[in-house]
Image (cartoon, rainbow, N blue to C red):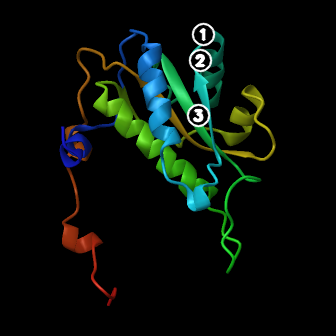
Amino acid sequence: MNFVKLAEDRYSLRKFSSRPVEKEKVDLVLRAGQLAPTAANFQPQRILVIESSEALEKLKRCTPCHFNAPMAMLVCYDETASAKRNYDNYNTGEADASIVATHLMLQIAELGLGSTWVAHFNPATIRQEFSLPEHYVPVALLPLGYPAEDAAPNEQMHCHRKPIEETVFYNTFS
């Protein structure tokens, strides 16, 4: 599959099968995240694999958007490990974690699994339930697994894209 086709076909899965994801596939997904580029190659991402029934119950206390997936990945960054821009001390951690999460999602899709990016979670509850170190910042939850037999993309949202002329500019924005 070429990349554009993969990007076109991937959709936000919100209906999962109960079928467990094989360890080899989880390992491949995590490898894709490990290979993601980060600022100055500092690799501040910290990924929590949530797969035990106890951990999945904790997840349900953090967000209504767990979709009863058989597992999830919590993507965070370590504020003490992320690059800071010289000019204004901009912390690249959120961008780095977002790139990593995108790599995870695309690898998940390439393997025939599904996921969705969940930002609707309570960070304080996540911190408490999963004992996050103070300097870890949660960025995204990725519920993941095999699609349920009747799962399908939301047609109203999946295929709708603004014309490229509205989002891409050359040499100046004016």
Q: Residue at x 34, y 85 (%)?
A: 173
Query: Quick one: SS at disc 3?
Result: strand
- Residues at badges 3 and 2 in contact (C-beta under 8 Å)? no
- What label does residue 56 carry, if any? 2
Which quarter shows the C terminus? Answer: bottom left
**Between 23 and 137, the one nearer to me in the picture:** 23
Residue 67 showing in the rendered view? no
Give, as a three-letter code, the residue at label 3.
Leu
- What label does residue 74 carry, if any? 3
Relative side of 10 to 34, left or right: left
Mark 1–mark 3 Cα distance, whole angstroms, equals 15 Å
Q: Residue at x 58, y 60 (%)?
A: 39
- What label does residue 53 carry, if any? 1
Query: Quick one: SS at disc 1?
Result: helix
x then y, percent, for residue 91: 67, 63
Query: Quick one: SS at disc 2?
Result: helix
Q: Residue at x 79, y 38 (%)?
A: 133
Mark 3–mark 2 Cα distance, whole angstroms, equals 11 Å
Relative side of 54 to 31, left or right: right
Residue 140 showing in the rendered view? yes
Residue 161, image quadrant:
bottom left
The tag earlier along the polypeptide, 1 or 3, is 1
Mark in the foreground, 3 or 2: 3
- Residues at badges 1 and 2 in contact (C-beta under 8 Å)? yes
- Residue 85 vertical placement versus 91 (above, below): below
Residue 171, image quadrant:
bottom left
The tag earlier along the polypeptide, 3 or 2, is 2
**Between 39 and 67, the one nearer to me in the picture:** 39
x then y, percent, for residue 34: 52, 40
Give, as a three-letter code, the residue at label 1.
Ser
